[in-house]
Amino acid sequence: MSPAASLRVAEVFSSLQGEGLWLGQRHAFVRLAGCNLSCRYCDTPRTRKVSAGKPWSEAEVRGALSRLFAERKHDAVSWTGGEPLLQAAALPPLMRWVRSQGVKNLLETNGTMVEAFKEVEPFCDLASVDVKMPSAVGRETWSSHLEFLRVAPGKCFVKAVLTARTTRAEWRQIIRLMQEAAPDMPLVLQPATARGGEGPAEPDAVVFFLRQAAALLKDVRLIPQWHPVWGLP
């Protein structure tokens, strides 16, 4: 990998996966810097800017992961951020190497960069697609999400973070997106973890969203974010 193709890395660490379909598994996390959105509920706001990370070569990333793999068994590497797909061109060789070590790849993405996703999709074992609502990001991204879900494979799941600002109209739009583009894809409802003044949806609202989705989609799950409860990064 040339210096120009190096990754801007904020941190590499080992922890338990605290959300989604692989909840509770031991993962190595590669947190990349830079994001194309600004969510009110973001749990890593420091990584929104590319300057939050330092340039790492492919060899440096492999070395950091190798040291973690030597310490204990890991089920997967979580490529997270920020938005990892901003650096998609540099990811395939590393994701291929991770698989050669007998470890899976999990991509955590906001689901707005479809062409970049096509570059890494062959090397993903699971992708968490965080569909954003206007009340959370300050603008609509529905068309980008629709395009993304239309090309997303069966190994993806949709995550919807429910905040106190989430509206029923937004929720109906998420269901329509999935019915049109990904009716068989799992949908994970994740009440926001209170931080920065952005609180979770009220319990009654969560129950409403859950019941409405379960009546119209095939696979709907309520999975809160657990690593803050566990006191883990």
Image (spheres, rainbow, N blue to C red):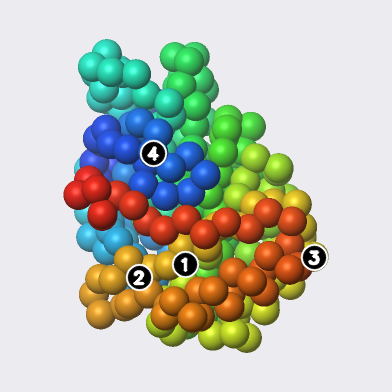
Eyeballing the image, is 8 above or below 71? below
Which comes sooner in the sequence, label 1 or label 4? 4
Q: Which residue is mark 3?
A: 180
Q: Secondary structure at mark 2?
A: loop
Which comes sooner in the sequence, label 2 or label 1? 2
- Measured as percent of width and height from the top left, residue 125 is found at 57, 33
Q: Residue furthest left?
A: 231
Q: CA distance from mark 1 to mark 4?
A: 19 Å
Q: Are marks 1 and 4 in contact (CB under 8 Å)?
A: no
- Image mark for residue 41: 2
Q: CA distance from mark 2 to mark 3?
A: 27 Å
- Measured as percent of width and height from the top left, residue 55 is found at 26, 39
Q: Residue at x 70, y 43 (%)?
A: 153
- Measured as percent of width and height from the top left, residue 8 is found at 30, 44
Q: CA distance from mark 4 to mark 3?
A: 31 Å
Nearest the eye: 123 or 16: 16
- Measured as percent of width and height from the top left, residue 13 is found at 24, 35
User: Of tags 1 and 4, which is closer to the observer?
Assistant: 4
Which comes sooner in the sequence, label 2 or label 4? 4
Q: Which residue is mark 1?
A: 161
Dot 1: within a 10 Å radius of its alpha carbon, few (fewer than 14), some, or many (20 or more) residues? many
The three-letter code of the residue at mark 4 reads: Gly
The three-letter code of the residue at mark 2 reads: Tyr
Q: Which residue is mark 4?
A: 24
Q: CA distance from mark 2 to mark 1?
A: 8 Å
Q: Quadrant of the N terminus?
A: top left
Which comes sooner in the sequence, label 4 or label 3? 4
The three-letter code of the residue at mark 3 reads: Glu
The three-letter code of the residue at mark 1 reads: Val
